[in-house]
């Protein structure tokens, strides 16, 4: 298991834009990880999305999956630790179930392929044992700015 301290050593995201609490499974053969995010009513985005009916914004679920993909790359040492990643594509995204306070968001990311500086992942987010969102993500790697 990887805790929040190690996650912050691997990726540059910080509160309030860090959406992974811990990694619960790493599969070196499949190049995949499973992570979790506990969804609390205290999350800052719930103040405006939507008052009286709090739902985690879909774009933030996608961001959580992207962060999980980065953790996969860096923890499995598939990418250089000084690399910086930027989205170049988000495909086939489907939202299946709302994510609400009290949910435990389970984040699955698997490397599909890479070609030089381009990396492609599939991601699936589960809440309450049901798929909440899924998609395919492409990112470009570049040396980290100092």
Image (cartoon, rainbow, N blue to C red):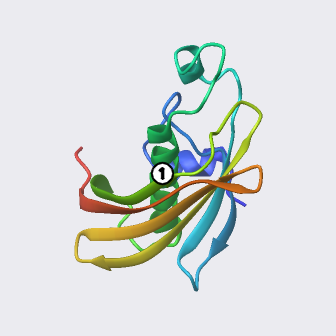
Residue 24 on image: x %, y %: 72, 61
Dot 1 crowding, Cα within 10 Å, few <14, some 14–19, many 20+: many
Circle count: 1
Across and down, in percent, residue 67 comes to 48, 51
Name which residue lies at 24% across and 44% down. Answer: 146
Badge 1 is on which residue? 67
Compared across the picture, whether 96 is left or right of 79 comes to right
The residue at the point 45 percent across, 58 percent down is 70
Residue at (53%, 30%) from the top-left corner? 15
- Residue 129, percent across and down? 76, 56
Picture coordinates of residue 60, whole percent (x, y):
48, 39
Quadrant location of the N terminus in the rendered image: bottom right
Q: Is residue 109 above or below residue 4?
A: below
Name the residue rendered at 70%, 23% in the picture. Answer: 41
Callout 1: helix, strand or loop? helix
Task: Tell me if residue 47 comes above or below residue 28 in the rendering.
Answer: above
Q: For this rendering, which residue is in front, 144 or 112?
A: 112
Quadrant of residue 51 in the image?
A: top right
Q: Nearer the viewer, residue 104 or 129?
A: 129
Name, please, the residue furthest toward the bottom: 29
User: Is 7 or 48 nearer to us in this picture?
Assistant: 48
Quadrant location of residue 106? bottom right
């Amino acid at each position: 298991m990887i805790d929040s301290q190690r996650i912050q050593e691997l990726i540059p995201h910080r509160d309030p834009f860090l959406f992974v609490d811990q990694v619960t499974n790493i599969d070196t053969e499949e190049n995949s990880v499973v992570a979790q995010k506990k969804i609390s009513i205290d999350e800052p985005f719930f103040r405006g999305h939507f008052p009286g009916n709090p739902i985690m914004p879909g774009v933030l679920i996608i961001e959580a999956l992207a962060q999980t993909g980065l953790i996969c790359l860096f923890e499995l040492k598939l990418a250089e630790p000084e690399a910086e990643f930027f989205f170049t594509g988000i495909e086939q995204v489907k939202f299946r179930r709302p994510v609400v306070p009290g949910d435990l968001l389970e984040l699955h990311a698997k490397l599909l392929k890479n070609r030089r500086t381009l990396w492609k992942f599939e991601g699936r987010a589960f809440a309450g044992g049901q798929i909440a969102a899924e998609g395919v993500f492409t990112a470009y790697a570049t040396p980290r700015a100092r």
